[in-house]
Amino acid sequence: MAHFFSFVHIALFFVAFIAGIIDTVAGGGGLITVPVLTLSGMSAVTALGTNKLQSAIGELSATIRFWKAGNVDYHKIILGIVFTIVGSSIGTFFIQIVPQSQSNKIIPWLLLLFFIYYIFSPNQNKVSLEKDLPKNPRKLIPMGLIIGFYNGFFGPGTGSIWTISLNRLYNLRINIATMYTKPLNIAGNITALTLFTVGGQVDYPGALAMGIGSFLGGQAGASMVIYKDSRFLKLIFTTIMLLSILSSFIKVYY
């Protein structure tokens, strides 16, 4: 118990709480949690595995909520889920066979690349006309493989990539795209988490502390979405992320 309630775990709880709020409002919460986990002393692969568990805990409540409310037709995304699982399995396999010295160097660059993508991606707040996916959304097959692979190999920002892709390729309203994103993303996360667990790459006390923080942050973020209070959070996100990326580069290269 003393180990669980260490200062590091308390700090991880608050980081996950903030990231959970930001992820709900603007997406990309993993861009904060992954570099913080590596800065806490974990290897790059263990940080990714631990982040999968805390992220899955945070997303599960939203997935269940949408399912109970009947907002998502899960029959339409079965193929997408299957190929997301395949892609995530392949990506997770590859990141675990990459030498740790190399993966530690790769992670900061991937963080930087996705951060640039996040900053320059199209505005997700536009209202599209479509209220649901078509009956046979076959584009979900290549999307599942590609985005699933990214989720397994790296992961931060996968939810944002899914939402933007569904919004653009199927002209979905952004709230509908977000609802479909949750089950697709959690399928990839649980698949990767299973393989990371088998490989012994999950820090359970850290993941549980962050999972609680992520769950509570997600609830708080949902309230902020309702009241449209997101500009300040996006400013906090970009500031924290830039500091985290800088710290990650310093840790690895200096």
Image (cartoon, grey):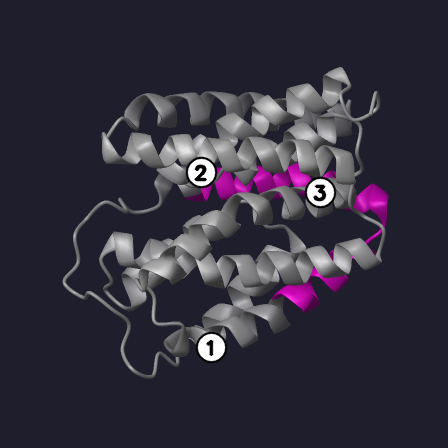
Q: CA distance from mark 2 to mark 3?
A: 17 Å
Q: Is 235 rendered above or below residue 67?
A: above
Can the viewer see residue 26 in this picture?
Answer: no
Q: Work out how far the residue at label 3 is from the one at label 1, CA to CA, in angstroms.
A: 27 Å
* Contact between labelled residues 1 and 3, with CB atoms less than 8 Å apart: no
- What's under tag 2, amino acid-wise? Asp
Q: Quadrant of residue 13?
A: top right
Q: Are marks 2 and 3 in contact (CB under 8 Å)?
A: no
Q: Amino acid at mark 1?
A: Ile
Look at 66% across and 19% down and name the residue there: 11
Q: Which residue is mark 3?
A: 50
**Residue at the top extreme, as displayed:** 7
Which part of the image, by quadrant, shows the N terminus? top right
Q: Earlier in the sequence, mark 3 or mark 1?
A: 3
Residue 115 lies, with reference to residue 88, above or below; the image says above
Query: Where, quadrant-wise, is the C terminus in this rendering?
Result: top right
Q: Looking at the rendering, which quadrant does residue 176 occupy?
A: bottom left
Q: Residue furthest bottom?
A: 136
Main secondary structure found in the magenta portion: helix
Tag 3 or tag 2, which sits nearer the N-term?
2
Q: Which residues are magenta?
A: 88-117
Query: Which label sits on residue 23?
Result: 2
Image position of 133 (left or right of 110): left
Q: Can you give x and y, in whole percent of width and height, for residue 202 in the image?
A: 78, 45
Question: Mark 1: which secondary structure?
Answer: helix
The numbered disc on residue 78 is 1
